[in-house]
Image: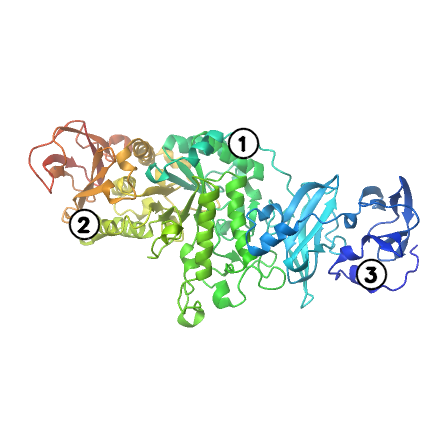
Amino acid sequence: MATKSKHDPQLSLIIEARHHNPFAWLGLHQDHGKPILRSFLPFAGRVWVQVNGTWEEMPRTHPDGLYLWQGAGKLTAPCRLRWEQDGKLHEQPDPYTFPPMLSEHDLYLFSEGRLRQAYKMLGAQVVEHCGVHGTRFAVWAPNAERVSVTGDFNRWDGRIHPMRAHGSSGVWEIFIPGLEAGSLYKFEIRNRQSGHILVKTDPYGNSFEMRPGTAARVTAPSVHQWNDDVWMQERAKSDWLHAPFNVYEIHAGSWQRGEHNRFIQFRELADNLVPYVKDMGYTHIELMPVSEHPLDESWGYQTTGYFGVTSRFGTPDDFRYFVDTCHQAGIGILLDWVPAHFPKDSWALARFDGTPLYEHEDPRLGEHQDWGTYIFNYGRNEVRNFLISNAYYWLSEFHIDGLRVDAVASMLYLDYSRKNNEWLPNKFGGRENLEAIEFIKELNMMVHQDFPGALTVAEESTAWPMISRPVYLGGLGFSMKWNMGWMNDTLAYIEHDPVHRHFHHNQLTFGQLYAYTENFVLPFSHDEVVHGKRSLLDKMPGDTWQKFANLRLLLTYQMTYPGKKLNFMGNEFGQGREWAVGSALDWNLLDISWHKGVQNLTRDLGRLYHSTLALHELDFTPDGFAWIDCHDADQSIVSYLRLARDGSYVIVALNFTPVQRHGYRIGAPDSGKYRELFNSNAETYGGSNTGNGVGLEAENTPWMGFPHSLVITVPPLAGIIIQHN
């Protein structure tokens, strides 16, 4: 039976879960020079405290669950409790008798936006504190009156574990002794102004329960032993500007599926994907977002758990194993990363403490109307710290080799996809998002300084200058930029019936006017094979033969044109239908010779690109490319040189009509013998095997500004690569 106690307003605040500073009242304190211990255990029966090695019972002084001990014995923090609950006896130290763990220095750096490893301070950390094992929780919620940790360990009751407020930092903290990895938890937040209660998942959570659940999961420290030292050392000194870079973009949930259409796990992906990518001649895998997200159909681009590896595919250590396996096989890993916006789900970042915390309050600054999402407030130190720390987390904790930053254009422009009255200009009256620009520069400087050899790639679709130029030269600092102009022109051209292509020849040639203004990647990405755009194969005009010949020609053009390469999964074997997030690629198509031929071509092109300096060494400078003939619109043929620094070169000729061209003369730099190195019309690729064999002899007939010339056969809807012997 509870004993009577005087009314205490602080007790009311505890019982009503409104106390801003519960550590000031709960726990061990002094009362007129004597120790007093207050513990709030609403579901306990009897409670004892250990005093001088002896268990003394604590009277229940309030029926809602307040227990109080006051006596002459000596109590030292942390005080050990024993209590009866649900027919069991429990024993742990009182959480409210532990000192704080967060340092003033870290809190200061966080408030300044300069704590790059904020994920080690915030979130749930399995630690030892005062010699006791448990979990420390910390969260940023500056507009809260009270914040509690709730979970499957306290009946999701916000009264039981209210947290300590760290002054004006807005950070709340509590250490819960004995709480182990695997527990599910959320934060319950009472807004200071309105009194509304919000239940939120952890912005810094390292793992989460499987959707549709939204709770974070306490995650044990990693036990993975990395075996990629050789890769990391080589990466740090790599000359990526002049190295092959051939990216295979995948969605981990639909590359393959297991029995009954289940998601394959990261360890399975390591066993199956890595050998395939290696065999196909790719240098890197780009993963669409693997951070936690609630909706499969968002493909991961509407993230709710920025620091959490999605539970769909395994644990964080499973992901480490996958990356490690890739590195040991000589394959780099890029990760799609989304700092441009976040979803409005009420249990995640949106209005996190009852106010626009991570986003702008004004929808003219804070909302993407097209996507129904919020825009990060890049001018707020703690928000910028959240994003910078998140990039640091993936690069450091998982040895990621680069970030492909999504939707950069939407970050750069305040009027992006807005009408005149729907946006606010910057302080100079312009449309540039100055805060986002500074964030991007800071991000790129951090990556290049702290992670030598790691890359950042911008998906940016406008003419903003110097995207991929260093910050110290006035650029944004990205390593590379997707060449959306080349991609759009190329796909528009190839979709024309060949009989009409000569009217659109400039779509093949215009790209050279800007090809070296940025470090470009040539992308045929997931965005081009969804939402009614059709697969690459299905975009091709003509009958079956023409469709496959066009696709082979398109891939040959991409692999021989200046710029690094990226293809979405399925492109490499001619996936017939559009990509669908809910099912695996149609691997059974490889039983059909047409598709097998495209795969063979992709493999050979990847290997040739990797082994031939002229095809990759000077992708970003004009001295790696020279037109032989860009004017033959009537026959829809282009020919060009690709060159290397050692003077070696290859000749590329592409015929975009189904008419075979015999006796076609092109200029050549040197006399002597040449050989056909590659022909997309080869029988092994599904072609008719017409070409030039292995022997070609240059004639001393000047042509097209070259001192010599070759007379060649250019197969129909095909590309050939010729090399000087």
- Report which residue position mark 3 lands on: 11
Q: In this view of the protein, which residue sits in the foreground, 628 or 582?
A: 628
Residue at (15% x, 48% y) in the render: 631
In front: 14, or 438?
A: 438
Question: Please, what secondary structure does the residue beneath circle 2 have?
Answer: helix
Residue 252 rendering spot, x and y as whole percentages: 48, 41
Q: In this view, does 95 lie to the left or right of 463?
A: right
- The disc at residue 499 is 2
In this rendering, position of residue 361 left or right of residue 250: right
Q: Classify the position of the C terminus by image quarter.
A: top left
Distance between the Cα atoms at labels 1 and 3? 51 Å
Mark 1 — residue?
A: 226
Q: Is mark 1 on a helix, strand or loop?
A: loop
Q: What residue type is labelled 2?
A: Val
* Lower sequence index among marks 2 and 3: 3
What percent of the width, then of the height, locates residue 526? Answer: 40, 47
Which class describes the residues within 10 Å of circle 1: few (<14), some (14-19), or many (20+)? some
